Amino acid sequence: MEPVEINAGRCYLRAFRADDLLDDRVALVEAFGDEAMRTFVRQFRVDTIEDADNYIATRAREWENNERASWAIAEPTTGFLLGEVGLKNLSPSATAVPEAAIWVHPVARKRGIGEAALAAVVRFGFGALELSRIDYVCDDANTASAALAARCGFTHVGPTTTPDGAPAQRWTLTND
Ligand SMILES: CC(C)(COP(=O)(O)OP(=O)(O)OC[C@H]1O[C@@H](n2cnc3c(N)ncnc32)[C@H](O)[C@@H]1OP(=O)(O)O)[C@@H](O)C(=O)NCCC(=O)NCCS
């Protein structure tokens, strides 16, 4: 798949960038240094500009391989990075249900950015990708994430575990 841009109202969604006009790498390092990110987004470490380069390259490769569609959440006028949202488990060979994932930069939280971005990506998943179901998994202790899932219309399914074995809750949304 080719990365597409999405207008999500209070933010827009675009591919990550590291060029002369827009460079997301410093904001990525800042965001991944945040305590909530270290606690709840454990699959990735972005401690250095080189890590950020690798992270951006991984996301681009996942688009190419139809594995994961991910977007930088960007401020509408400046284009500055406000977070990331995506859909994973998209490959036809994936055994797990497609799942949404999101984080918002600490300076941009609690302003409705997460809700706007997640809602837009769900619409893209059901509309453009014709998915029938999208799940959302968050750690038991992640009250902000659970509130976001509820706000975006996901239904609580019940307990599950994260890939690294932490107790978590599964939410789901079907396209009906
Ligand atoms: C979870 C997260 C993405 C929410 O993003 P956000 O932009 O702050 O969320 P929004 O401002 O759109 O708020 C959406 C809903 O969640 C609620 N919410 C947001 N942060 C909250 C908090 N810390 N505690 C309780 N509720 C919270 C909001 O009140 C809103 O619900 P409401 O409209 O019914 O009041 C953000 O806190 C984050 O990036 N956390 C760290 C990374 C993370 O945990 N990612 C999810 C992994 S599963």
Image (tube, rainbow, N blue to C red):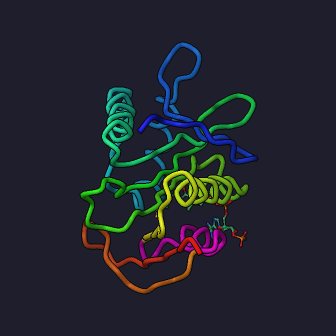
Residue drawn at (38%, 27%) of the image: 49
**Residue 147, magenta (yes or no):** yes
Magenta segment: 139-153
- Asked if 32 appears above or below 50 in the picture, the reply is below
Q: Is residue 118 left or right of residue 101?
A: right
Q: As displayed, is residue 171 above or below residue 7?
A: below
Q: Position of residue 60 (x, y in %)?
A: 38, 34
Q: Is residue 171 magenta?
A: no
| Predominant secondary structure, magenta span | helix
List the single residue furthest toward the bottom.
158
Quadrant hosting ligand 1? bottom right
State left or right for residue 20 relative to residue 6.
left
Residue 94, image x, y percentages: 27, 60
Looking at this view, is 44 or 136 the one in front? 136
Residue nearest the viewer, comparing 72 with 131: 131
Residue 36 at x, y percent in the picture: 48, 58
Looking at the rendered image, the quarter that the N terminus falls into is top left
At horizontal 71% and vertical 28% (from top left) the residue drawn is 78
Residue lying at 34% horizontally and 58% vertically, measured from the top left:
89
Q: Quadrant of the C terminus?
A: bottom right
Q: Nearer the viewer, residue 54 or 97?
A: 97
Residue at point 39%, 33% (across, down): 56
Reply above or below: 112 against 154. Answer: above
